[in-house]
Image: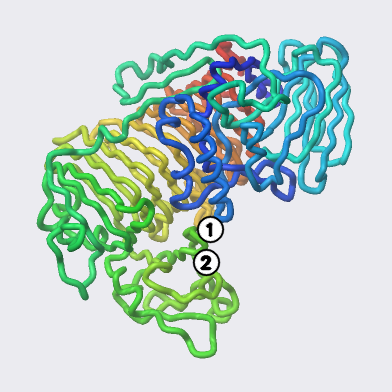
Amino acid sequence: MNGETIAMIKALQVKSIEELKTSGGSADAGKVLTVGSDGKLIPAELEVGEGQVAVDGSLSVSGAAADAKKVGDALSAVNGSLENLNDTVNEHLGMSYFPVEKGNFTASGDGDSVASIKYYCRTVSGFWIDCVDDTKITIFNKDPNKYKFSIARYDANGNYITATLWINTFKYEYTVLSGYKCRVRFTTLSANVEISVDEISNNFTYETEYLDMPTTVDSLDNSWKLSNSVDRVLTNYSLPNDFSATNFPITIYTDRRKYFYNFNESSFKTTGGITYYCKPYNTNESDGDGTKENPIMLYTYLTTLQADGDTLILQDGVYCDLAKVKNSSDKIHKNINIIAENSKRVIFVGNEYGYLAAQVWSKNENSRTYINNNSEYVKGATKIVQKFMGRFFALQRVDTYALCNSTEGTWYKKDDNSSPYIHLFGNEIPTYANVFVNNITLPILYCNSDNQNINLYIEGLIFIGGGNGGVLFRNSQIYLNPKLCAVDCDFLHSYDGDLSNDAISILGANAYFVRCRAMYASKDGFNYHKYNDVPANFIEIDCIGSNNGVDGVAESNPSSIAYSQNGSTSHDNAKGIRINGLYYNNYGTNLADVSGSKTVNIQCSVYEGAETLGGDKYDCDFGTITDDGNSVMYIESCRSFGTKNSIYVATGTEMHINNSDLNGEIINNGTLYINGSKVLS
């Protein structure tokens, strides 16, 4: 079945005045879109630590009304961060619609900034027209070299008929015949275009993403007039019957078009213990007493002081402390909170001698390279990562010293017993804070619940490297119900030279991730399996799983596993919820749920898969990709584009798709429902 035939299944509905007043809470002001050289939408991701400052957190949780000051503050915060945009993400909440009168209107902005604030909305992404009479549309594109648009035609019931290719002319006229619907989409959300619409009789709906509306309709500019408002009721979204036996600590609401959630991450913090301020391990420093002015080394706390209820406030720095802990009994074995004093300024590395980094790099004379002769620090190095322009890039290992010397972002080592040479991006000088050598084959953070059910809360941390899962959290034969809650954490570059390293590995535990990123692992981003016959349960909220399995490992190992690196994947009867997630550019199915797993995926953007060699089920965005039966995926108001296949339903599995925008093909070998109707294979 061609995905274009059924992909555009979003209902056309008019937004009420009351909802417009309150929709500011849906905005994630930390994200914008840019345009690629091919004219496609390329979502752009704020780098480490910047997205969290944009919008009052209560708005994201509840969808509550934003007053004009909060809107202004949010937009100002975005503008202040635009110069540091990196990587790619996608606007992923649902569309918003409201009607306007016929006539001319302008969408302002240069494609790299927020649209004009006077209109109280961030962006123009497109519009719909319901044609009572023949309707002529004239589009004036003020910068055709930068912006493109496409016009699609639908029948009166909203069924897709045809569409133009992307158009980049200065002026374009298009006539929609009576009784048809028309949709115009822009390749940028801040398109600098002017649209003239003729004879539309109140059936014109203006389509935006992430409305930032004032609290009173009177403060809207006169060119934005509301009409035909219909009250919308916010109701509880009921999880499918498959989830009835699982007590997920989240409440989801819907107005039948958009979704909101209430998840109290603070409720997972343990209480009743002592608060310690901690600093990184360093043999050149002495321990303190754990006060803010005299912090204790984290390694000392882990090996001598762990107690239920404690809270650790980690001061800025690069920590080798978790990697240094060798005895499993000294790993995390109590219910504690580990929180960065300043979010995203605490970095855990996969190297127990990381504290030596500043002491051992020396410049080669008359070259651009630096060498490291400390055997403890560099032996067994599997990956070297540089922090450059706010991001964490893996250096590429090359075959010759000459190539390393001439090429930024590379490293060279003659053999396993030799010292490595590095040539950093920007010809930077290597320091303790910008170069991270991974050389461990075990996870950086490992929790096995051997002595009790562990409740672990972590916040604002970055993990770089690690093996066998950068972070591994599991149950034990006796204690089967541990819980992990991670908030605003990054799990990056897990790798020990093979394909077995997930950024996060959850085995038979309950795990909840809020605004976390799992990226650049040699295998999967978020990975869930059973352990001791107990399945994993999980929630991912506003998370990113991307660029996993694309570091050259899979290409050099053309086995079946080489095609199956996922942004997020569940196995063995796991149950999970993903909300507002971004999953893209993974070397395999971006989202894959198999072996009896069941997931609900709400308002997620899943796109631009990197795998093209392994076949349809891997060149795919959403997939129950193994023919093992019973896996079920629910897809609610999601988006998929830029990958050959949006959907792959394996034999014996089910997929339920509702109100989603899917631009790839749909392959159905199992049972498929679209908007409640069963589709024949």
- Above or below: residue 310 compared with residue 318: above
Total labels: the figure holds: 2
Question: Looking at the image, is mark 1 or mark 2 nearer the viewer?
Answer: 2
Q: Which element carries disc 1, helix, strand or loop? A: loop
Residue at (35% x, 80% y) in the render: 360
**Quadrant location of the C terminus?**
top right
Question: How far across and how far down the image is residue 69, in percent?
Answer: 50, 35
Front position in the image: 228 or 390: 228
- Above or below: residue 495 compared with residue 411: above
Question: How far across and how far down the image is residue 610, in percent?
Answer: 59, 46
Report the residue marked by disc 1. 552
Task: Identify the coloring.
Answer: rainbow
Q: Which mark is residue 117?
A: none
Residue at (53% x, 24% y) in the render: 215
Question: How far across and how far down the image is residue 302, in percent?
Answer: 16, 55
Q: Which element carries disc 2, helix, strand or loop? A: strand
Front position in the image: 502 or 650: 502
Front position in the image: 527 or 81: 81
The answer to whether the residue labelled 1 contacts the one labelled 2, judged by CB atoms less than 8 Å apart, is yes
Ranked by sequence position, the earlier of labels 1 and 2 is 2
Residue at (29% x, 33% y) in the render: 510
- Above or below: residue 517 compared with residue 94: below
Asked if residue 194 lies left or right of residue 446, the reply is right
Question: How far across and how far down the image is residue 358, in percent?
Answer: 35, 75
Asked if residue 348 lies left or right of residue 388, the reply is left
- Above or below: residue 471 compared with residue 170: below
Kind of residue at badge 2: Gln
Report the residue marked by disc 2. 396
In the displayed image of the protein, which residue is found farthest to the front? 218
Give the Cα separation between the discs numbered 1 and 2.
Answer: 9 Å
